[in-house]
Image: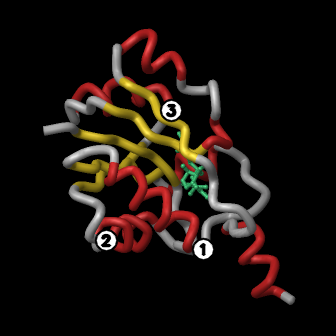
């Protein structure tokens, strides 16, 4: 039984989000997803605020067939604890983060996979299109 873990905001859920979750699930038997809390996201000073609150983002992600469990990610410092608490064997994230999470492999001995981002779709771009 291989457990995979991934993290993200998943605001204005789109095709790129679906694809990374589906591809992550193909690499394991059980997929756990840490969805960033509103406070955590806003503390990262992104270019725009959130559209959906955590409850909505978490419910959408949790309703997917490829997702087995969802929890709230409250801060970056707890990442190692979340990975250990969920007994993850594999950490998955998009390749926009390539290299950033190598410490998970080095320090925790957990496999790390950077999956290619789906091109031409992002929450920021969607918000821009809707505004026009
Ligand atoms: N993603 C993707 N293709 C896109 C857009 C996003 O594969 N076109 C992936 C990202 O690489 C990430 C996941 O979808 O793995 C979630 O993306 P975001 O909601 O933008 O998450 P982010 O705010 O980057 O948070 O510690 C890592 C962070 O928690 C990730």
Q: Which residue is mark 3?
A: 76
Residue at the top extreme of this rendering: 107
* Earlier sequence position, callout 2 versus callout 3: 2
Residue at the right extreme of this rendering: 132
Q: Which residue is mark 1?
A: 51
- Image location (x, y in percent) of residue 88: 26, 32
Q: Is residue 64 above or below residue 40?
A: below
* Earlier sequence position, callout 3 versus callout 1: 1
Mark 1 closeness class: few <14, some 14–19, many ≥20 residues within 10 Å? few
Residue at image point 53% right, 46% down = 40
Mark 1 or mark 2, which is nearer to you?
Answer: 2
Residue at the front extreme of this rendering: 26
**Element under label 3?**
helix
Position of 78 with respect to 68 (left or right) is: right
Mark 3 CB near ligand 1 (8 Å cut): yes
* Quarter of the image with the N terminus in it: top left
Q: Which residue is mark 2?
A: 64
* Colouring rule applied to residues: secondary structure
């Amino acid at each position: 039984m291989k457990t995979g873990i991934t993290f993200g905001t998943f605001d204005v859920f789109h095709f790129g989000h679906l694809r990374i979750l589906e591809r992550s699930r193909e690499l394991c038997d059980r997929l756990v997803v840490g969805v960033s809390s509103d406070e955590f996201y806003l503390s990262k000073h992104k270019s725009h605020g959130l559209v959906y609150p955590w409850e909505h983002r978490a419910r959408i992600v949790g309703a997917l067939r490829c997702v087995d469990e969802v929890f709230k990610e409250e801060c970056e410092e707890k990442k190692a604890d979340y990975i250990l608490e969920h007994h993850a064997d594999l950490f998955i994230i998009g390749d926009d983060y390539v290299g950033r999470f190598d410490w998970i492999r080095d320090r925790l001995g957990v496999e790390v996979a950077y999956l290619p981002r789906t091109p031409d779709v992002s929450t920021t771009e969607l918000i821009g299109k809707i505004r026009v």
